[in-house]
């Protein structure tokens, strides 16, 4: 049994998410907000997950998001991120110079996410990779110690 929350800054996207949750009869609380200013008290969550979103943030917002995630995680809580990461396939390495044109993706492509999310105090590591047409994805895991 779990309490599940979904967060997005775009009310329209929250509507889509709510519709999908309703179709699956999933109990989810949806909130409007930004990751760099989470609308939750300290030490609220056992787990925080992010899927293909972090690359949309500029470096200062990634840093603030990392601090906010650390704040809302309970001791021993885990962070799970899947997002674009340092290229590991030949295709990803060829695509890398093109992706560097997007400022928001630079930290991802440089492989800096473990450091950014580790700096507030999480123990982080890349635990897997996945190839996509748009670039190489990395699975980042963090634990609040």
Image (cartoon, rainbow, N blue to C red):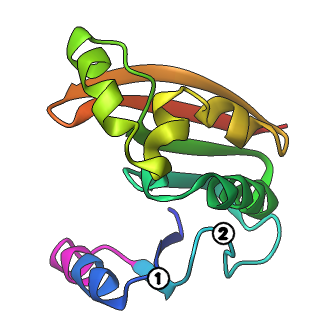
User: Is residue 109 depicted above or below 120 in this figure?
Assistant: above
Q: Is residue 68 magenta?
A: no
Q: Is residue 122 above or below residue 103?
A: above
Magenta stretch contains residue 23 = yes
Q: What residue would you read off at disc 1?
A: 29
Q: Quadrant of residue 142?
A: top right
Which image quarter: residue 109? top left
Is 1 left, or right, of 74 in this rendering? left
For the residues marked 2 and 1, what is the alpha-carbon distance in whole angstroms?
A: 19 Å
In the rendered structure, which disc, 2 or 1, sits on the residue that comes first in sequence? Answer: 1
Residue at screen point 20% across, 74% down: 20
63 with respect to 52 (left or right): right
* Apparent side of residue 140 relative to residue 61 in the rendered image (left or right): left
Q: Position of residue 89 (x, y in %)?
A: 28, 12
Q: How many marks?
A: 2
Q: Residue at x 67, y 82 (%)?
A: 39
- Which one is in front, 77 or 54? 54
- Give yes or no for contact between labels 2 and 1 (Cβ–Cβ under 8 Å): no
Q: Where residue 12 appears, x then y in whole percent? A: 28, 88
Residue placed under numbered mark 2 in the picture: 36
Q: Position of residue 35 (x, y in %)?
A: 59, 68
Above or below, comparing residue 55 to residue 68 in the picture: above
Extent of the magenta region: 18-27
What secondary structure is found at the residue carrying circle 2? loop
Predominant SS of the magenta segment:
helix
35 or 40, nearer to the observer: 35
Instruction: Measuring from the top left, give residue 87's x and y in whole percent.
Output: 37, 20
Q: Which residue is depicted at the point 63% across and 51% down?
A: 59
Residues 128 and 34: in front is 34
* Closest to the observer, 137 or 6: 137
**SS at mark 1 in the image:** strand
């Amino acid at each position: 049994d779990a309490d599940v929350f979904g967060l997005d800054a775009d009310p329209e996207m929250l509507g889509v998410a709510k519709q999908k949750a309703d179709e699956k009869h999933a109990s989810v609380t949806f909130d409007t907000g930004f990751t760099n200013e989470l609308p939750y008290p300290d030490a609220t969550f056992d787990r925080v997950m992010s899927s293909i979103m972090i690359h949309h943030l500029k470096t200062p917002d990634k840093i603030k998001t990392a601090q906010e995630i650390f704040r809302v995680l309970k001791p021993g809580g885990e962070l799970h991120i899947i997002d674009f990461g340092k290229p590991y396939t030949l295709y990803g390495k060829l695509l890398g110079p093109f992706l560097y044109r997007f400022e928001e993706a630079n930290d991802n492509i440089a492989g800096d996410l473990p450091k950014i999310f580790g700096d507030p105090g999480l123990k982080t590591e890349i635990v897997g990779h996945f190839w996509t047409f748009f670039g190489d994805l990395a699975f980042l895991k963090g634990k609040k110690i």
